[in-house]
Amino acid sequence: MSKPALLQTGPMMALIEKELNAAFIVHKVAKPADLEGVLAASAGSIEAVCTGGHTGVKTDAALMARLPKLKVIGNFGVGYDSIDAAAAAKRGVIVTNTPDVLTEEVADTALGLLLMTVREFGQAEQYLRAGRWGTEGDYRLTPQSLRDRSLGMVGYGRIGKAIAKRAAAFGMPISYFGRTKQSDVAYPFYNDLTAMARDVDTLMVITPGGPQTKGLVSRSVLEALGPRGIVVNIARGSVVDEAALIDALHKGTIWGAGLDVMYNEPNIDPALLKLPNTVLLPHVGSASIHTRNGMGQLVADNLKAYAAKKAPLTPVPETPFKAW
Ligand code: 8YV
């Protein structure tokens, strides 16, 4: 039987590329500007797409409409905001993502980023490396501490729960915001984010990106959080109104921010770099060899399941699997 054709929207880990090349005829887009050329030669034959937020190619309704034989889209990442899952559902296309394998790693990163932001560890390390400890004395006592902080979870899914478990072990009182109250969760629930921001001093953003959550952490949410307020974003840059955040950090409307994700990453707003009360990480939430290998294998296994006409392992809720 001949192999199905697959569109790879950008570079992928070696382990993914190796497995895809064995199971598919791969049409690879090396950089977004090459997309049209690759499509001109292959669009009519493509049955599968392998993509990820990092490729810079959006698998939107317009792209799907140009791939008449498309059956499956495998996403590298648990977040699939670069794919129009509703459009895929309408076309009977299955979207898969990489849940679970990254949960603990991202939760570890979230706590690391929270501690760095609250206790200024990055700034303290820079102080030492600059030789200032010996000449100027101890780094300052940090005005902020986890000891008197309460955590508001902006999103309470699998990763949110893993973060909350860690934060509870650190002794933090926890609340959560979401669309609906979860019957098996005892923590205080808010369906009004501004109200939760008023009652806590730390927001942990771990909700999916995309149009539904764009700008959710708005200027008024930041104002409600107040001058001791700290925002940690481990989700997507789009969830926070970045202009409002920069303004709030600049004016002291809130205390600080720890960001693993930014609006226009990797080309981030230079204003963020100038803010001393900000810890910035280059989207490394899941970025260990262990976890990325797990994610890569799951991407390959989902797509290979299609090539073998078997059920995909992790279809997203919008596109439940029935049959190929
Ligand atoms: C990915 C992520 O590594 O899983 C996600 O949603 O943000 C990261 O873990 C990133 O999307 C790479 O494309």
Image (cartoon, rainbow, N blue to C red):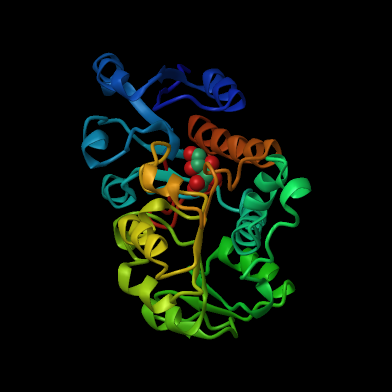
Q: Where is residue 302 in the image (x, y as percent from the top left)?
A: 53, 39
Q: Nearer the viewer, residue 228 or 71?
A: 228
What residue is rendered at 59% in x and 59% in y?
Answer: 117
Q: Quadrant of residue 25?
A: top left
What residue is rendered at 40% in x and 70% in y?
Answer: 253
37 left or right of 221 in image: left
What residue is rendered at 41% in x and 38% in y?
Answer: 73
Q: Is residue 180 visible?
A: no
Q: Nearer the viewer, residue 121 or 40?
A: 121
140 left or right of 16 in image: right
154 left or right of 284 in image: left
Q: Where is residue 56 in the image (x, y as percent from the top left)?
A: 36, 33
Q: Quadrant of residue 212?
A: bottom left
Q: Position of residue 312 (x, y in %)?
A: 52, 43
Q: Can residue 252 be seen in this view?
A: yes
Q: In the rendered view of the protein, which quadrant contains the C terminus?
A: top left
Q: Where is residue 63 in the image (x, y as percent from the top left)?
A: 25, 34
